[in-house]
Amino acid sequence: DAGITQSPRHKVTETGTPVTLRCHQTENHRYMYWYRQDPGHGLRLIHYSYGVKDTDKGEVSDGYSVSRSKTEDFLLTLESATSSQTSVYFCATRAGNYGYTFGSGTRLTVV
Amino acid sequence: DQQVKQNSPSLSVQEGRISILNCDYTNSMFDYFLWYKKYPAEGPTFLISISSIKDKNEDGRFTVFLNKSAKHLSLHIVPSQPGDSAVYFCAASPYNNAGNMLTFGGGTRLMVKP
């Protein structure tokens, strides 16, 4: 178990407000990822990081930004939340093999 | 265009019988394939994987089959148990992707009836 903690677990926010989701890992893994899960779409990659201050865009990055100032923390920010960003967000890390370890998710509702 | 597809959104089987979950992919660069299992309110957890150099990998009740020519893989669960009821995601990755990013299918919800 990679010891991944996501916070908050649930959040309701209003359209147009900024929101930051946090992912914290205790295993010193280099690679970290943010995915969103939506019905019919499975898990889609938003952004990923391959080290401190090294990040890149994924498949659905529009409207999202990320930051990684420390190995253990990977933050996902919605600059101005929209209803289309209502989703369940998962953070993941990768160890030496190909597999991911996921956090428990953050359920975000934008009203 | 989805590169990894799970065409069956849901599957219902009787306890003790075989569950077969299917996955198709389009990207010829995919070299490594994984199955993840997800319970409600939890993150996905790794179940089983297979490299393209193999056509079968078995782990207890779970077996994954890979047909590279058809770009198709399947997960067999024998015998199925009620605790197997979950959403199953197929995922794929190209070998030479430095970040080893996984591309996921849309998921199949398996319901095992007692």
Image (cartoon, coloured by chain):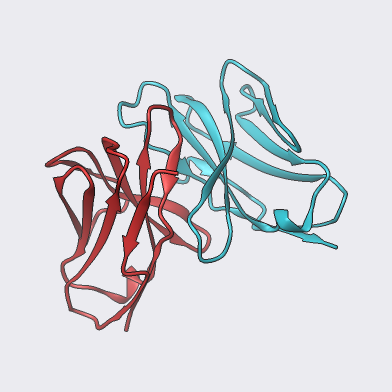
Chain colours: A red, B cyan
Residue sticking out furthest to the top: B53
Counting from the top left corner in percent of width and height, residue B12 is at 78, 59
Q: Residue at x 56, y 20 (%)?
A: B52
Counting from the top left corner in percent of width and height, residue A20 is at 21, 66
Please state, as top left, top right, bottom left or bottom right, where the N terminus of chain A lies in the image: top left
Name the quadrant containing residue A104: bottom left
* Residue A66 located left or right of residue B106: left
Q: Residue at x 18, y 79 (%)?
A: A16
Q: Is residue A59 visible?
A: no
Q: Residue at x 40, y 51 (%)?
A: A44
Name the quadrant containing residue A107: bottom left
Please state, as top left, top right, bottom left or bottom right, where the C terminus of chain A lies in the image: bottom left
**In terms of depth relative to the viewer, which is nearer, A109 or B84?**
B84
Q: From the viewer's perspective, is residue B63 above or below residue A53?
A: above
* Residue B63 located left or right of residue A86: right
* Residue B67 located left or right of residue A15: right
Counting from the top left corner in percent of width and height, residue B5 is at 56, 45
**In terms of depth relative to the viewer, which is nearer, A56 or A10?**
A10
**In terms of depth relative to the viewer, which is nearer, A47 or B36?**
B36
Q: Is residue A68 visible?
A: yes
Q: From the viewer's perspective, is residue A5 above or below residue A110?
A: above
**Count of labels in the image:** 0
Counting from the top left corner in percent of width and height, residue B51 is at 55, 22
Name the quadrant containing residue B53: top right
